[in-house]
Image (cartoon, coloured by chain):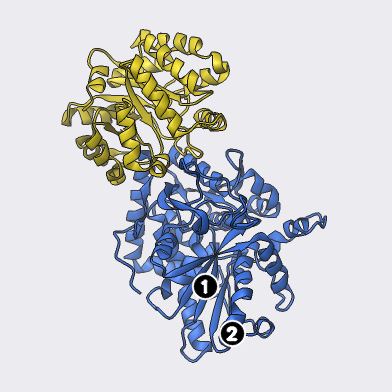
Chain colours: A yellow, B blue
Amino acid sequence: MSERIRRAFAARKAFIPFITAGDPSMEVTEQLVYALEAAGADLIELGIPFSDPVAEGPVIQAASERALAAGFTTDKLFEMTARLRKRTDIALAFMTYLNPVYAYGKERFVRQAAECGVDALIVPDLPFEEKDELAPLCEQYGLAFISLIAPTSRGRALRIAAEAQGFVYCVSSMGVTGMRARLGTEIGGIIRLVKESRDIPCAIGFGVSTPEQARDMAELSDGVIIGSAIVDIAARHGKDCAGPVREFAEKIRAVL
Amino acid sequence: MSIPASPPGRFGVHGGQYVPETLMSALIELEEAYNAAQADPAFAAELDALLTGYAGRPSPLYFAEKMTRDLGGAKIYLKREDLNHTGSHKINNVLGQTLLAKRMGKTRLIAETGAGQHGVAAATAAALFGLECVVFMGKEDTERQALNVYRMELLGASVRPVTSGTQTLKDAVNETLREWASRLADTHYVLGSALGPHPFPTLVRDFQSVIGRETRRQVAAAENGRLPDVLLACVGGGSNAIGLFHDFIPDPSVRMIACEAAGLGVDHPKNAATIANGSVGVFHGMKSYFCQDEYGQIAPVHSISAGLDYPGVGPEHAGLHDSRRAEYVPVTDAEAVDAFGYLSRPEGIIPAIESAHAVACARRLAPELPADSILVICLSGRGDKDVAAIARYKGAVIHE
């Protein structure tokens, strides 16, 4: 397991922001990583924009469209990430649908990701049954292949957790990513079950958008993933979003 | 030719279950319900009764004598799925899945639709069984298939225009998957084609393979026990094609040809010819061929036919292409529109613009075949829904 991921969960509740890479530009994405690190993020998820992101709500869908329209390519992301890695030691994960990985060449993608200093891969459309597409390659190149557990995982949760690496991404509630007024707490029960079987960090994502929600979810878990709320700030401020994103991230950090 | 055995839900390398974890429990529930239904004679009996009494099966196999004479060559038969209740083959699958939904205790159906034929069939079954129904349809498609939108609403369904992406069939599938992930407990996703994550490609194919089983019987009855020589069907996702083909896969003498939508031409950027132009990828829950760019972004596609305007193809077709058991040929918008008019005259049958792709291919192929050969075209749907759009394509202005 990546040392950087272990460290992200070692000292405190982990704050894991998500941003869509290339929205509005690669330069701004790079600035956002530094801003989020300065605000106290422990692990940063860089989302690879995809033409048809079926697990995403409207905010991240729109960000993906903007990034692709602005000329995002997987190669540009690797270049930017390699540059980033020279300046920061923060844990980094790529979040991507399988098809961009598949089209790039699975081994070529995983090798490049490892070479430019990525620590983990999160692939929302690759469930436990299909994880052999990437998990063995991730193992070979030293990346954590992140497993997801949902409120409907029930009997599957322990099997998934038994083979999970890095941390378990726990989906707070059904549906797609996006800001929600209220979050269920049934994922808490599944996390307790996982924890009884294995000592592995569990972070909650999907729908978490306010400091209050972040605090509540952190009580049930080891960390909180926040995406749409940050991507929404980036959308509203465009190329000048680093300041407002940092302010928001500091508020989240303060309650964790 | 034998097809290598694959695990359930795999067709060679294709198929699988590439969906978010949130959906896995629903797919497992569906597979279990389907396995239980297959073991229960009452399920088959109830479905048969509906197919006969409600949908109007068996659909006729019609000998197109004038077309045969006109083209000179193979004897042409039309498998008249257009005569089913709701006007297409889609009802076969919808009735099967709705019975499954009932067995699972679901009270709400959601569906994607391209041309609107599947949406109409889903709305019809929902009305029959007293279920709530929501149909997702690309906004562009709601405009080119306005008649079907009104039919769905008349049947009590609500139609949600999808404004994301290219606003066509693939975006309707995206949105229906998103809706399903947010509401599994009372909702069944009636997927309309032989695509998507396992078990959909298998169960949709099973429900549609009644087309091929009837065709085998009907050709044998009309032609002294013979098998057909050539089967022709249009392919988008490919449910009518796999429905016709499946029963004949073990018969090596039967040539199977699927016609994919080449839009403005296979070499023109505006086409939807997935097998001709696509490459292997993973999308909409399955591994198969997809039109995509070098970075795996799904390409915008085009066909005059909303039902074939899809950047992928069902995984069993991808497998049949890899094994060369079936042939996949491109047919352009212009050829399909020509065939739409062609069948209307000598035979007095207006085909759906989707099915017209198969008719177009028959016009090329039949004259090259010997006079005693038997060619079956799956006429997957009727063309009433397309009349206004074809008129517009030809520059005429008519109001529906």
Q: Chain of mark 1?
A: B
The residue labelled by disc 1 is: B52
Quarter of the figure that contains the N terminus of chain B? bottom left
Choose top left, top right, bottom left or bottom right for residue B89: bottom right
Give yes or no for contact between labels 1 and 2 (Cβ–Cβ under 8 Å).
Answer: no
Q: Tell which tag, 1 or 2, sits nearer the viewer.
A: 2
The quarter of the picture where residue A152 lies is top left
> Which mark identifies residue A144?
none
Disc 2: which residue: B75
Q: Residue furthest right?
A: B397
Image location of residue B83, percent across then percent down: 61, 71
Which residue is depicted at the point 56% across and 83% down?
B369
Left or right, A204 with reference to B80: left
Distance, label 1 to label 2, CA atoms, is 28 Å
Image coords of residue B396 (percent x, y): 82, 57
Kindly identify the amino acid type of the residue bearing the numbered disc 2: Lys
Q: Residue at x 37, y 39 (%)?
A: B22
Which is nearer the N-term, disc 1 or disc 2? 1
Quarter of the image containing the C terminus of chain B?
A: bottom right
Residue B62 appearing in the image: no
Q: Is residue A2 above or below residue B325?
A: above
Rendered location of residue B310, percent (x, y)? 55, 52
> Compared with residue B185, is residue A227 higher up or lower down, i.e. above or below?
above
- Lateral position of residue A189 relative to residue B232, left or right: left
